[in-house]
Image (tube, helix red, strand yellow):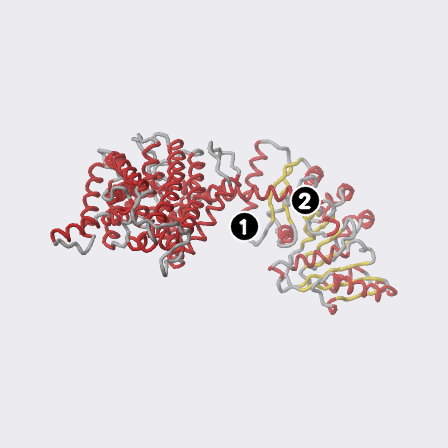
Amino acid sequence: MPDNLLKNKANFGTMPVFLTAISTILGAILFLRFGWAVGNVGFIGVIGIIILGHLITIPTAMAVAEIATNQKVLGGGAYYIISRSFGLNIGAAIGITLYLSQAISVAFYVIAFAEAFDPAIQWLADNYGLLIYDKRAISIPTMTILAGLFLYRGANMGMKALYVVVATLGLSLIMFFIGSPDNAPTEMVLDATVENPKSFFYVFTIVFPAFTGLAAGLGLSGDLRNPRKSIPRGTIWATVGGLLIYIWAAYKFTISASPEDLASDQLIMRKIAIWGPIIPIGLAAASLSSALGSIMVAPRTLQAIGLDDIFPQKGLNKWLKSESKKNNEPINASVISIAIAFVFVFIGDVDFVAQIISMFFMVTYGAICIISFLEHFAADPSYRPTFRSKWYLSLMGAVLSVWIMFQMNMTYAILSLMIMGGIYYGINVTTKENRGLAKLFRGVVFQLSRHLQIFAQRAEKGDRELSWRPFAICISQDSFKRRSAFDLLRWISYKYGFGTYIHFLEGFLNEETNEESKQVMNKLINLASGSKNRVYLDTIISPSMTSAIAQVMQLSGISGHGYNTILFEFSRTEPKRLNYVIDNYKLLESTHFDVCILNTSYKGFGYQKEIHVWIGANDLENANLMILLAYIIQGHPDWKKGTIKIFAIYPGDQLESQKEKLLALIKSGRLPISPSNIQLINANYANKKQVIMSKSIDADLSILGFNHEEVVEEGVDLFTGFEDMGNILFVSSYKEIKIK
């Protein structure tokens, strides 16, 4: 992912970040809507709004500080952080909505600036009869002048003006806090509100943009000498400072005016301040500074999106990247941002614009908190921030952001998510880059898997004896000749067990064989990707199959348990391949593994409709495992139409007792096997192999048992002689398994 966002000229320090953020926090909402909020929800309610808002903004500020001290945050601010963590696809979807909220914010603050002229409008009407019915007569020329100055002078003009504006803002707030109106309430009522007040979350929606100043400071990242230092300090200072001032302001409003006055007069601060005219001046200064901050930030976000070549039109990306040669300003991105701002200035409704801004910012803050939360659990060695937030704070910020989105306005929330989803889909079609998200979630899954494995190992103790499930491993050197063993393993491990498939490469470990193993691994992954499977794949290089078996049987399973079952396979046309199992059978037996040997035929697994389980008099320990494996295999979607039939070969005097045992086992084990599918055969009058072939010639899979004595006595012949049958699975259980 290229980092094209580095500016040639970056000369701002921490103070511009703080001033941009604090002037936005203590801006238009504080002057125009905070008194109204106190009147509608009371002191206790507005304190709840402040706390709830900062339960999102403080974790976000800490997350921003953490991310910024781990990586160099270049041009684009919040967009840069999100796109470099979530990848360009998701980062761009969120980044475009973030940009829209920043561009709309310009209009919001210009509209608020026009509201500051209420006293002047009233004075002109009273003294000169000059009536101004529509404040757009002020906001539109203001937007025009602001756009012209910014396009001509750039961010430096905005930053110089910012110092003057913040000084004026500070003076107006001081005069507000030291003021004491004559008609102040005689006592403080904490829950006093107007009649028929607005709902808590509606008021929260209107007020929340006041707490979003940290995003304004983030947007200057490309113009900072040291973003790693300036962003954490500036955003945290502004967020905490804003929190304290808003709590103090809520108290001041409550003790200075009645709820009716607070709700009806949007410039009630004039009547509270020691010198009333300073309030419209402060509002104008705050609105102007916030508008300047937004008009500096929005074009830089859009330029950063263009630098990442997000839009499918290359010409558009190139056009957005271009800068003014005079002052390195993103001139074309500024034109687009100003055009969007003009549209919403024409709308002219402060509350409507505030709702849109709140929704988009809520999405952005939630994304930043999720990044911080996931980074904590991914435990990536490259993630080494010098400032550390707490994972539970980030999680709280993320959850609250999503929850409050739907509480504020469900229609807007759904619409915002649909817009982001549409943008993501469009970008995903043209851009295949998503490494950031994949890397982040891969780290989280790795850590979760690690913890679960350790937990499983510690909790194991004797549980495997009480509740058996297959932890199977298969080793084969014929992976690319036959897929039967892999298919069987994926059926076993689909729902009830764990499976590891290992391809054996004969030879000594060196550079050549190591490279070959990587190529084989890629081929295995490609082959496996075309089927429903949950099998872990690997390769092993060893000088002989004996040494490979010894190594494989000592491997630790990916489930956190060791293995309890090993699977081999051989083709019916190459029975000599089975010698490595016969020769190493003592080794297999000494490790107390259940041993499965798959005899593959030209029929394969047929139509995957019938599984025949053959139980003989020598299968005392094998019977339960054979039945249980049949049931587990049938649980895979490939066998959804399959049935299990059990054939039991016993001497005539044992037939009835064995049938009762089988029926009791199936009933107690709650196995989906019909009693009509159990058939008993008198062994006194039957040749076992002939009976099996006659009954199971059309079976898709037959399961037979064997034991050590039979292997010693018959060798390879035990597993051969079943011509024209489908695949056969031979099973030898180390000890009898309980079916509960």
Front one among 317 and 59: 59
* Residue 88, position as x, y percentages in the image: 40, 44
Say what secondary structure mark 2 lies in: loop
* Residue 208, position as x, y percentages in the image: 37, 49
Tell me the residue that label 1 is attached to: 529
Q: Residues within 10 Å of mark 2 (few under 14, many from 20)?
A: some
Residue 522 is at least partly visible in this image: yes
* Residue 542, position as x, y percentages in the image: 66, 36
Front one among 447 and 319: 447
**Quadrant in the picture for residue 351:** bottom left
Q: Residue at x 20, y 38 (%)?
A: 152
Say what secondary structure mark 1 lies in: loop
**Left or right: 525 as drawn, with respect to 221:** right
Q: Quadrant of the N terminus?
A: top left
Of the residues tagged 1 and 2, which is closer to the observer?
Answer: 2
Q: Residue 394, relative to residue 508: is it above or below?
A: below
* Residue 408, position as x, y percentages in the image: 40, 55
Distance CA(mark 1)–CA(mark 2): 25 Å
Front one among 61 and 94: 61
Residue 333 is at least partly visible in this image: no
Q: Quadrant of the C terminus?
A: bottom right
Marks 1 and 2 in Cβ contact (< 8 Å): no
